[in-house]
Image (cartoon, rainbow, N blue to C red):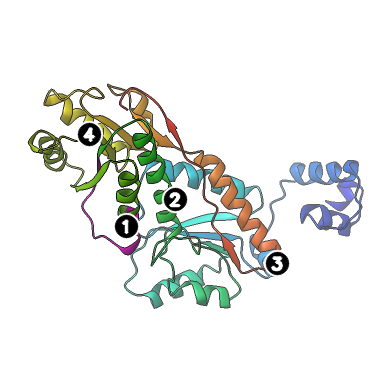
Amino acid sequence: MASRAGVSRATVSYVLNGTANQTISPRTTAAVLKAAEELGYRPNPFAQSLKRGRGGTVLLPLPEAPHVMVLAAGIDACAAALAEHGLTLVTDVTQYPSAASRIDAWMRLHPAAVIDLFLPAGDPAVVPLREAGVAVLTSTAAPVGDASAADMIAYEARKTQLNYLLERGHRRVVIAGPSAPIPAHERVRRSWAAAAGKAVGATVTARRADLSRRGVDAIADGWRSGAQQPDAVAAFNDDFAVALLSAFAVRGIRVPQDVAVIGVDDIPLAAACTPTLTTVTSDVAAWGRAIAGRVCDALEGSSDVVPVPLFDTSVVVRESA
């Protein structure tokens, strides 16, 4: 390759490895890259790992993470951005029987970095990873207890959702979501929601039901049977909100005239259903790229504590609220 490009082997190495502090002209760089392309050069990832002293894998554990379009878009954007830096994003949805088995499995991957997005704060796997020299994007920004960075992101989305309804004058708001154990950070969110409502003379209550015909019907039937019918529903996500729109329509409950409905995620169906769904959105593609940027910063720097970036949320106003 060096002879084809008309340069030294050292110059070829500098160009292909992106070696810093080298004065190589654009013309020479172009000649080396052209020769590499013509010869079908492919870098040896094992050799590169040895030279760097780390692997080229970035691990994203997804224990019990929701399989939703928004998360997939963020992961795709992050993977594409990391690939530009020669890094490969690997997701892991395995349910390990113990913390020790998780740590062993992840160590065998020899990751350059781990994105701690869905791990609970204080997860026992984080310290051994750091001690092994793995860069960890941590969830230290979580609000309370064992909340993960993903919980923090969801917390901000719920605040945007509820504030929108309160600012629009709704005073009897139901937060509708799936049945699940209530961890400490969820209790904090409910406490905040109740206080936010009280500050403007509103009542905010929670209704829990599975995302099923029976569960959604129970919430819709409860709208008619309550002593004070809610004037707004903040749904857990757009899937839940669209199901509620259908349940309300079957019962002749008009949206938004009788009850406003707002979702979270801005899935494509939100703009196609009837009525179109008001929802909370964010630039998840930019968020994925931001995470990749933080990973690269961590690998180039000396700090072993790098916060997972959060993102700004906004409301897409449509017909339902």
First in residue order: circle 1 vs circle 4:
1
Three-letter code for the amino acid on which mark 1 is drawn: Glu
Q: Which numbered disc, 2 or 3, marks the residue that appears first in the sequence?
A: 3
* Sequence-first disc among 2 and 4: 2
The residue at the far left in this view is 225
Give the residue pinned by disc 4: 243
SS at circle 4: helix
Q: Are marks 1 and 4 in contact (CB under 8 Å)?
A: no
- Give the labeled residue for mark 1: 186
Q: Is residue 114 shown above or below 232?
A: below
Give me the C-alpha separation between circle 1 and circle 4: 23 Å
Mark 2 → mark 3, Cα distance in angstroms = 33 Å
Magenta segment includes 188: yes
Q: Residue 307 vs residue 101: left or right?
A: right
Q: Which residue is disc 3 drawn over?
A: 52
Label 2 near label 1: C-beta < 8 Å? no
In the rendered image, the vertical position of residue 97 relative to residue 180, given as above or below = below
Frontmost of labels 2 and 3 is 2
Residue 152 drawn at (x, y percent)? 43, 54
Q: Amino acid at mark 2?
A: Ile
Mark 4 or mark 3, whichever is nearer to me: 4
For the residues labelled 4 and 3, the Cα–Cα distance comes to 51 Å
Residue occupying image coordinates x 91% and y 51%: 7
| Front: mark 1 or 2 | 1
Q: Nearer the viewer, mark 1 or mark 4?
A: 1
Q: Quick check: 2 above or below 132?
A: above
* Quadrant for the C terminus in the image: top left
Q: Quadrant of residue 189?
A: bottom left
Asked whether 309 or 212 is in front, the reply is 309
Q: Nearer the viewer, mark 3 or mark 1?
A: 1
Residue range (magenta): 173-189
- Residue 153 is marked as 2
